[in-house]
Image (cartoon, rainbow, N blue to C red):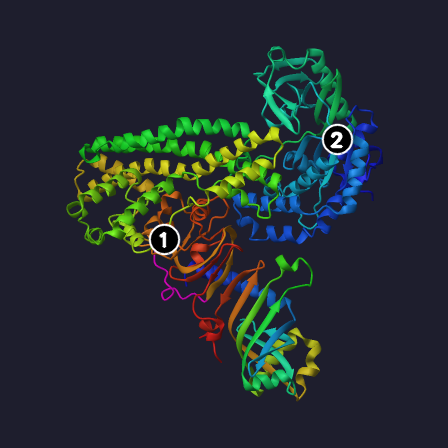
Amino acid sequence: MERGDLIHRQKVEATLRGLLSGQRLAVVATHTAGQPYANLVAFAESPDLMSLFFATARSTRKYENLAADRRVALLIDSRRNREGDFHEAAAATVIGVATETKVVEKEGALGVFLAKHPYLEEFVRAPTCALFRVCVKKYILVRNFQDVMEWRVEAESG
Amino acid sequence: MPLILHPHEIGENDRPTVGGKAFALARLVRAGFQVPGFLSIASGAYREFVSQAGLGERIMLELHRKEFKQMRWEEIWDCATRIRNLFLRAAMPVGLAQELRQAVSVQFGERPVAVRSSAPDEDDAQSSFAGLHESHLNLRGAEAIIDHTRKVWASLWSDAALLYRQELKLDVAQSAMAVVVQEMAPGERSGIAFSQNPSEPSQAVVEAVHGLNQGLVDGAVEPDRWVVDRDFGRIMGHTPARRERWAVAGTAGIELAALPDERAQRPPLASDEVQAVYELAKRAEAHFGRPQDVEWTIVDGRLLLLQSRPVTTRPQAEAGDQRAWYLSLHRSFDNLKALRRRIEHEQIPAMIQAAEALAGVELPALSDPELIAEIRRRWEINDRWVKVYWSDFIPFAHGIRLFGQVYNDALRPADPYEFIDLLTRTDMASLARNRLLEQLADQVRCNPDMAACLKRGDCGEQVPAFQRSLEAFIGRFGDLSCTVTGGTQCAGATRPLERLLLELAAHPGRSAGGESGQGALEKRVQQFAAAFPEQKRAEALEILELARASYRLRDDDNIHLGRIEAQLTAALQEGRRRLESGSVKEPSTRSELNDFLESVKLDSPAERSPARSNAQAASTVAPRQLVGQPAGPGVARGSARVVRRHADLDGFCHGEVLVCDAVDPNMTFVVPLAAAVVERRGGMLIHGAIIAREYGLPCVTGIPDATELIRTGDPLTVDGYLGIVTVSRGGSINAYSA
């Protein structure tokens, strides 16, 4: 990677890290037969930002949607519902694939998730709750109202 | 807290709301100094106006368009211009307008007043940066006062204030501006005084001019100057001025006029009056408990104090701090007129003559020592003109800005850059060059034989008349292989002119401006003139004419300078040719030639920037949408052609988007082929924006790292309305599947 590219990559990563660590909730988008569907979920990010985790009860519509198509988009942003959001807020759109964590990896994922959301321990450990891991393919970061950069995580991890 | 306060209503704790100037004036009134009557419009009025008009977030968006430290001075000026226009156009809250109208009508009636800034956070730092905010003089009537109050409010965000925002502690969320409305004293003689000379503590200084002191404060009128001994109040020295002009009240505002002879003959102050002014400054010092910098005037023999502030010295600029120089680019109309005369009548003809004389020297015929002497001579000539470029040509560009402000003040357009439309279709040298290129391309278009001979390079034998036209072009503008203005990069022997003509000929012609819009332009000029009262119209049109000259020169100077630099380059290339062929035998001559060549870093022929194709440099971070400034309206799509050096222009194809760091007029011959222009350097008045406007191309400027983030071949959409460039590298989001 050229030096200029590396600097841009580091800047984008640092901004994303700050944004993700500062937010607790994300909007997750799934679909049913092409009909988009959006929910608010608690999320946590892995230290390398390559995975995001969120939990949902298995009886939910989003669980059903994910069973049919694992592709997801998430939106994480720093808006505060004030006028200043227009110049201050940043937003990241995350494109990835969600997979329900199984026994082996679940404990590690739970550790990451509960470190951020300790108050959700009962919910996430319930037998009817699924903990999803989103393998991030791409982050799309928006700052300064309309400045947009993409980080293809998939290309780096692959 | 009332929004309008009389002097006796301003209390000890009101400094944050009425500002330093009003606060000091109120103290002087209470202490019995003779001060012209005034009112304070408290900072709460500013806050109400900004809040009611919804300007807060709009100012924030302007200031956060990009990282502030990445903004060039020209971008800061643009930013301040847009903010000022927001203030000019926003509706004044009805209740506030009524309150202001009532207060100023009762206090001043139709008597002339000054409307001055009084920044609430004004402290020592503010005082030492005095002059960063606006003041307006000689206004009559409530409407004019209210209208100019907006301008003073807007000047909280002037380019000067933004440049010194850290020193001023300018905080976007907290800062506000109070205003002083003060009766104009029709001073016969005026001036300033330092109760203590900042550079010599045992002395005081009195400066005086005939007429109003605005001329002195602006630097337009030279003052007589007296040095006074602080201990005994004795005059120690008098430096008379060349008394030629004075500032007098016009129908609206202040005018500079020739000083009548009988006044020019005598100093503005007699010795006893100098001492009286010094005593006044000393009393102000005693009152405030520290040395004071006072403004005073004499009306009907009465000495009045206009304002008083602590003596401060502006901190020494650190090395590399160019802000004072940027501010020095703000030139008065008179200064610009004098500059124009010098540039048009002396400098440009001299540059043309110098370039022609140099072109007449047969370089190959010179001996080696003669060639070295010739390089040195050309070096010095070039250096001299580069200095003129910075000292005169760059400051002359302020003519465009001056007109912009006059236009916006008068017409208050929705687009603060509408004024540029009145400046285009000027006869710029770069456009004349491009027209000539288009004529040549048109011949090729109609004559396949010419295209064939251009490809083969034997037009001299096949179509000698066309070859003569080519040579005439090269004689005037060069063969397009070299860039200039501080650079000596050349594309070498790739025959860029021939390639450009073939590319132009392969597509329909495109011209700048056009006659059809001429009538519309004249109508716009008439609308501009009609916005002024009849007695001001001639001056308004004169400012337009000056701005047109300024706009034209902003492009032309590079072309003229380019011709001189090309002659230096030619001599250096001759030196390199001799070194490479081994014909220079004398070791000292060889070493001297080498020194010259190394110091200018002449590029290898045809050396292009290293390719950064998508396939080669697979960065995982990519731009999707880049925000800059909208600098030319329109939308276009095309493949990016990233130009980092002159040689990258070679082979520019029709329909490509020119993406560059900083284009100069010597590079804009490809613009008729381009779909749009994108430039890293920001500003509405940079060359890329100027030429894009002439051709009606979408243009976005001020994108940080544009030439790093965008790569040649990237599919781009350039939105010149919003100032956004979208990069569609790779596929869309839908291309990713689970």
Quarter of image, res B515: top left
Q: Is residue B278 above or below residue A25?
A: above
Name the residue furthest left: B461
Which quadrant, please, contains the N terminus of chain B?
A: top right
* In the foreground, B345 or A126: B345
The chain letter under disc 2 is B
Q: Position of residue B457 (x, y in %)?
A: 19, 50
Task: Please say if the residues under marks 1 and 2 sit with CB atoms less than 8 Å apart.
Answer: no
The part of the image, by quadrant, that contains residue B434 is: top left
Q: Verify whether residue B489 appears in magenta.
A: no
What is the C-alpha distance between the residues marked 1 and 2?
Answer: 57 Å
Reading the image, the residue beneath label 2 is B182
Relative to residue B62, is residue B448 drawn left or right? left
Q: In the image as oriented, which residue stretches furthest toward the bottom?
A: A127
- Residue B453 versus residue B193 in the image, above or below: below
**Residue A67 image point, x, y percent:** 57, 86
Q: Are marks 1 and 2 on the same chain?
A: yes
Q: Amino acid at mark 1?
A: Leu
Q: Residues within 10 Å of mark 2 (few under 14, many from 20)?
A: many
Q: Is residue B635 left or right of residue B60?
A: left
The location of residue B407, given as percent across then percent down, is 57, 39
Q: Earlier in the sequence, mark 1 or mark 2?
A: 2
Q: Is residue B612 magenta?
A: yes
Can residue B340 be seen by looking at this rendering? yes
The residue beneath circle 1 is B673
In magenta, the rendered stretch is B610-620
- Report if residue B486 is visible in the image: no
Measuring from the top left, give residue B614's x and y in whole percent: 38, 65
Q: Main secondary structure of the magenta part?
A: loop
| Near-viewer residue (B194 or B219) | B219
> Which amino acid type is shown beneath numbered disc 2?
Gln
Residue lying at 62% horizontally and 10% vertically, measured from the top left: B262
